[in-house]
Image (tube, rainbow, N blue to C red):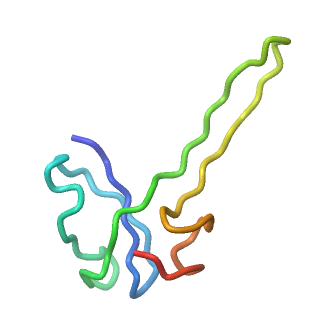
């Protein structure tokens, strides 16, 4: 089962849950305030690769699926 990340639009808590793919977008209660005003967000990621010259490069992704913010408090998305 994959781990999905969620964000609560009411309190801004970001949390992860191990869930079957079939329930990835099903309602889930916030682990902090128990609100079901939550939504799945994109996970943060980092990748490291080597360029043709042998130098390491890293790339980091954003955490919010609706904007470029890394916190749900920034845009209240959920």
Question: Between residues 32 and 48, which one lies in front from this camera angle?
Answer: 48
Question: Between residues 31 and 65, which one lies in front from this camera angle?
Answer: 65
Residue 64 on image: x %, y %: 52, 64
- Vertical side of 11 occupied by 42: above or below: above
- Vertical side of 47 occupied by 25: above or below: below
Q: Residue furthest front?
A: 66
Which quadrant does the C terminus fall into? bottom left
59 relative to 72 in the view: left or right: right
Identify the image quadrant of residue 67: bottom right
Residue 66 on image: x %, y %: 50, 67
Which quadrant does the N terminus fall into? top left
- Vertical side of 67 occupied by 73: above or below: below
45 relative to 22 in the view: left or right: right
Identify the image quadrant of residue 33: bottom left
Q: Residue at x 49, y 82 (%)?
A: 76
Q: Residue at x 33, y 53 (%)?
A: 4
- Vertical side of 42 occupied by 37: above or below: below
28 relative to 38 in the view: left or right: left
Q: How many marks?
A: 0
55 relative to 5 in the view: left or right: right
Residue 63 on image: x %, y %: 54, 59
């Amino acid at each position: 089962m994959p781990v999905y990340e969620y964000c609560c639009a009411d309190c801004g808590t970001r949390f992860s849950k191990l869930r079957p793919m079939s329930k990835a977008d099903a309602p889930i209660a916030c682990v902090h305030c128990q609100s079901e005003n939550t939504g799945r967000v994109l996970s943060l990621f980092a990748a490291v690769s080597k360029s043709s010259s042998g130098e390491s490069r890293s790339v980091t992704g954003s955490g919010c699926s609706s904007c470029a913010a890394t916190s749900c408090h920034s845009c209240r998305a959920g």
